[in-house]
């Protein structure tokens, strides 16, 4: 059965700049922590998979002393979980208030795939409740019920490790020859390729300059009739116009003639 596996952040919505970053900073302020991430700071933090892992990178001896934090590793782990829980709640409030609009083409492709009986999946290293909140807002509650969601701490290693994709692949019996992953970052692309899948990249605010040479196609978005996309690279048999259709997604299962091994 044909399947599409979506990443969440940067793919379903441009959530990093307008959602996660301000949510982290609001949480830091509420806890009186001596840090506010700038956009350039956060660009670097995005190279680390997972929100708790990004926050853990703050815990240098100097920061711990300055903030008056515990030095015991277990106490730090509990504190990170508490910070992350509050940050997730702030983020969900932002999603539900409508501050994070869907990226072009997501709802349209979802509706086409549901009508065609395709398997739909989200595979993300963000917290599961955050992912489900974004998914429901972007595609609607009824359509969201058609998705299988793999997220958060379901696996020990975050992207660029392939674990979240391998878990979905095993549990849903996803076949590489009929599955396309849609990602927005190099970490996600590397994870998808390592799991044996072809990957289409929709670049987002923080990833436009990253290396995506392994991707089957790179586009500015999936596009919509009123919001045309730009094709940046194309190694597939698809020949898209202003927006991708389900037929062109299916064509991405195959390399173009000139790119076949």
Image (cartoon, rainbow, N blue to C red):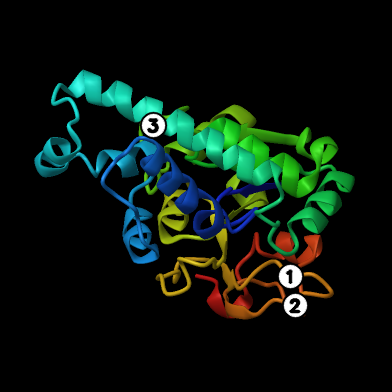
Residue 73, how many percent across, how many down?
A: 18, 23
Pick whichever of labels 1 and 2 is earlier in the sequence: 1
Q: Are marks 1 and 2 in contact (CB under 8 Å)?
A: yes
Classify residue 127 as left or right of residue 149: left
Classify residue 248 as left or right of residue 69: right
Residue sitting at x 65%, y 45%: 95
Residue sitting at x 47%, y 31%: 86
Pick whichever of labels 3 and 2 is earlier in the sequence: 3
Residue 126 vertical position relative to residue 15 in the rendered view, above or below: above
Could you tell me how far apart the alpha carbons at marks 1 and 2 are, in whole angstroms?
5 Å
Q: Nearer the viewer, residue 143 or 251?
A: 143
Residue 147, how many percent across, how many down?
A: 72, 36
Q: Residues within 10 Å of mark 3 (few under 14, many from 20)?
A: some
Residue sitting at x 67%, y 33%: 148
Q: Which residue is mark 1?
A: 223
Q: Which residue is mark 3?
A: 83
Could you tell me how far apart the alpha carbons at marks 3 and 1 are, in whole angstroms?
36 Å
**Residue 45 shows in the view:** yes
Q: Nearer the viewer, residue 26 or 207?
A: 26
Could you tell me how far apart the alpha carbons at marks 3 and 2 are, in whole angstroms?
39 Å
- Which dot marks residue 228? 2
Residue 123, how many percent across, how many down?
A: 56, 41
Instruction: Examine the image and state in which quarter residue 14 appears.
Output: bottom right
- Under tag 3, what secondary structure? helix
- Which dot marks residue 58? none
Residue 41 vertical position relative to residue 129 in the rendered view, above or below: below
């Amino acid at each position: 059965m044909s399947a599409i596996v979506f990443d969440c952040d940067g793919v379903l919505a441009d959530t990093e700049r307008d959602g996660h970053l301000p949510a982290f900073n609001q949480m830091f302020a509420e806890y009186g922590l001596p840090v506010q991430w700038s956009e350039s700071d956060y660009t670097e933090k995005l190279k680390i998979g997972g929100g708790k892992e990004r926050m853990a990178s703050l815990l240098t001896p100097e920061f711990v002393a300055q903030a008056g934090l515990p030095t015991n590793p277990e106490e730090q782990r509990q504190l990170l979980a508490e910070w992350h829980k509050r940050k997730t709640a702030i983020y969900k409030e932002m999603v539900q208030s409508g501050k994070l609009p869907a990226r072009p083409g997501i709802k349209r492709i979802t509706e086409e795939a549901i009508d065609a009986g395709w398997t739909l999946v989200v595979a993300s290293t963000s917290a599961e409740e955050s992912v489900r909140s974004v998914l429901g807002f972007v595609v609607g509650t009824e359509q969201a019920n058609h998705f299988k969601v793999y997220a958060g701490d379901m696996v020990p290693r975050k992207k660029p490790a392939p674990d979240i994709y391998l878990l979905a692949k095993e549990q849903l019996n996803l076949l590489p020859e009929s599955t396309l992953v849609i990602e927005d970052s190099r970490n996600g692309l590397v994870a998808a390729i390592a799991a044996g899948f072809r990957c289409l990249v929709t670049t987002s605010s923080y990833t436009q300059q990253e290396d995506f040479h392994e991707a089957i196609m790179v586009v500015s978005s999936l596009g919509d009739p009123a919001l045309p996309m730009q094709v940046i690279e194309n190694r597939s048999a698809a020949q898209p116009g202003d927006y991708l259709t389900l037929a062109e997604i299916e064509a991405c299962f195959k390399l173009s003639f000139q790119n076949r091994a």
